[in-house]
Amino acid sequence: MSVRLKPIKPKKISDQVFDQLRDLIDRGQLKSGEKILPERELAEAMNVSRTTVRNAISRLVFMGLLEHKQGQGTFVRPPESREANPLALAMEAQNATLEDLLEVRMGLECNAAALAAERADEADIRFLEQSLKEMRSEVTSGRLGTEADVSFHMAISYATKNPVQVHIMRSFYDFLFFGIKENLYYLYEEASRIQQIIDQHKALFETIRNRDPDAARQAMQTHIFFVLNFFRNREKEELEG
């Protein structure tokens, strides 16, 4: 055989630390603006060296997910302050609309919901439930609940146990954040609509918790169609107005 094969190397410890911190950010357990633990405490908690933690944090800073503040510590950067990822830049170059974004989400997330209903473990269910509670709390307080909304959808991706799905949604994260924020801004103009959104998330959560893939797929489709049709109708009214 002429193909040259490379020896398989075990995953570096710093990569494992990076993955764990990245997961905490994606799932919304480390929230925008939140200060992370100092290197020493992280190293002790993960039973690794401070150099290993420092390398992982440096990668997250380079990616724009964390930022160092002189004399204050290291913080999670808000999604809207991060530099656009390659997917977001590509979409902007193509003048992609919210409708385009929602059509892509339809394909990605309906399948993810079905897989999550089949594969979610108890930890995934807790992540989903926590995101749902935070969404309700944020909306009750008069805010949009954008980050909790994104965390809910990311938790579904993690629950698929499919690394490709997670990778795609990670790349999609900043653009997804923009889409959800824009969606909720307009939907929030009428209180009844935002309550419908929360009800749809609750129904979706219950289908996953009940291990019903077909119902989960349908619940996600219903949710995204609701938002998609809202924007289609809104655009139509603007053109006719």
Image: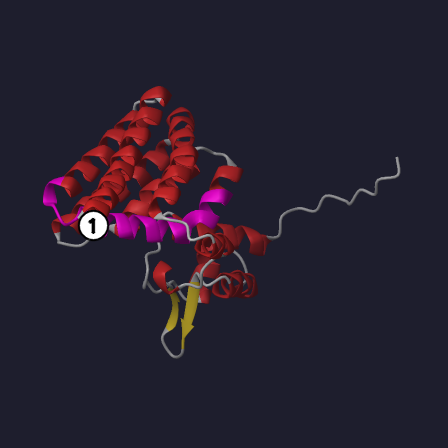
Could you say where residue 17 lies in the image, as x and y percent from the top left? 51, 54
Q: Going by the picture, which residue comes out furthest to the right?
A: 2
Q: Going by the picture, which residue comes out furthest to the bottom?
A: 71
Q: Which residue is mark 1?
A: 186
Residue 11 visible? The answer is yes
Is residue 88 depicted above or below 131 in this figure?
below
Could you say where residue 12 lies in the image, as x and y percent from the top left? 62, 52
Is residue 4 depicted above or below 107 in this figure?
below
**Which quadrant holds residue 108?**
top left
Query: Residue, x 57% and y 56% (percent of image)?
Result: 14
Query: What colour scheme was applied to this rendering of the protein?
Result: secondary structure
Q: Give 4 or 189, whichever is nearer the viewer.
A: 189
In the rendered image, residue 89 lying in the magenta stretch gets the answer: no
- The quadrant of the rendering that contains the N terminus is top right
**Which quadrant holds residue 112?**
top left
Q: Give 101 or 204, whichever is nearer the viewer.
A: 101
- Dot 1: few (<14), some (14–19), or many (≥20) neighbours within 10 Å? some
Q: Going by the picture, which residue comes out furthest to the front?
A: 240
Query: Residue, x 40% and y 79% (percent of image)?
Result: 70
In the rendered image, residue 174 lying in the magenta stretch gets the answer: yes
Point out the stretch of residues depicted in magenta: 167-192
Prevailing secondary structure class for the magenta stretch in the rendered image: helix
Query: Residue, x 29% and y 28% (percent of image)?
Result: 219
Could you say where residue 213 lies in the image, as x and y percent from the top left? 37, 22
Is residue 59 depicted above or below 184 in this figure?
below
Residue 78 visible? The answer is no
Of helix, strand and loop, which one carries label 1? helix
Q: Amino acid at mark 1?
A: Tyr
